[in-house]
Amino acid sequence: MEIWQYLIGSIILIFILNLFTAVASHSPDSAWVKLFFRTKFGPRTDMKYMTRNDLLWSAWMFLVYGAIFMVIFVGIWLMFTRRGGKTDSVSLWTALAIILLSFVVCIISACCLLITALFRKKDYIPPPPPEEELLENQKK
């Protein structure tokens, strides 16, 4: 494949993602929107609404995810370099770059959460998240 084919594919992918987000914003209470945008899976990053223990748990989860990305990176790297595989493949280098970038993002996120947790007071009471405020206002 040539570079212009990758560019066109990237532009089409960005357009589809933006269209998906636009359709979701018109019906935010649909079941499929909640499935994609309001899942409670993985570490949290809303530091203002987190206690010290929540911050430490999220930092730990980011470190675990970072370790998983590093194992995947090393596994793919060894698979292609030890067996004499073709290492000038654009798709291989793209996959390795994405995995490495994900590893770096996880490690930086874990460090930020850990630093925030270390400086957060033990008796910090977080304000209610905006979702809870909206639910309370709708009940009234």
Image (tube, grey):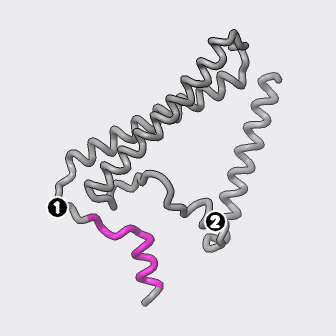
Q: Is residue 124 left or right of residue 13?
A: left
Identify the residue shown where x is 41% and y is 52%: 45
The range drawn in magenta is 126-138
Magenta residue check for 129: yes
Marks 2/1: CA distance? 36 Å
Classify 10 Å Cα crowding around label 2: few (below 14), some (14-19), many (20 and above): some
Disc 2 + disc 1, Cβ < 8 Å: no
* Disc marking residue 56: none
Find residue 7 and report its horizontal and vertical position in percent: 75, 31
Residue type, mark 1 in image:
Asp
* Above or below for 11 versus 128: above
* Disc marking residue 33: 2
Find residue 111 and report its horizontal and vertical position in percent: 33, 38
Identify the residue shown where x is 17% and y is 57%: 122
In the foreground, 15 or 50: 50
Q: Is residue 75 left or right of residue 85?
A: left
Which quarter of the image is occupied by the N terminus?
Answer: top right
Q: Using the rendered view, name the quadrant where residue 51 is placed.
A: bottom left
Find residue 30 and report its horizontal and vertical position in percent: 65, 72
Identify the residue shown where x is 54% and y is 61%: 39
Farthest top residue in view: 84
Farthest bottom residue in view: 140
Q: Main secondary structure of the magenta part?
A: helix
Sequence-earlier tag: 2 or 1: 2
**Mark 1 — residue?**
123
Identify the residue shown where x is 65% and y is 22%: 93
Classify 10 Å Cα crowding around label 1: few (below 14), some (14-19), many (20 and above): few
Q: Is residue 114 left or right of residue 7?
A: left
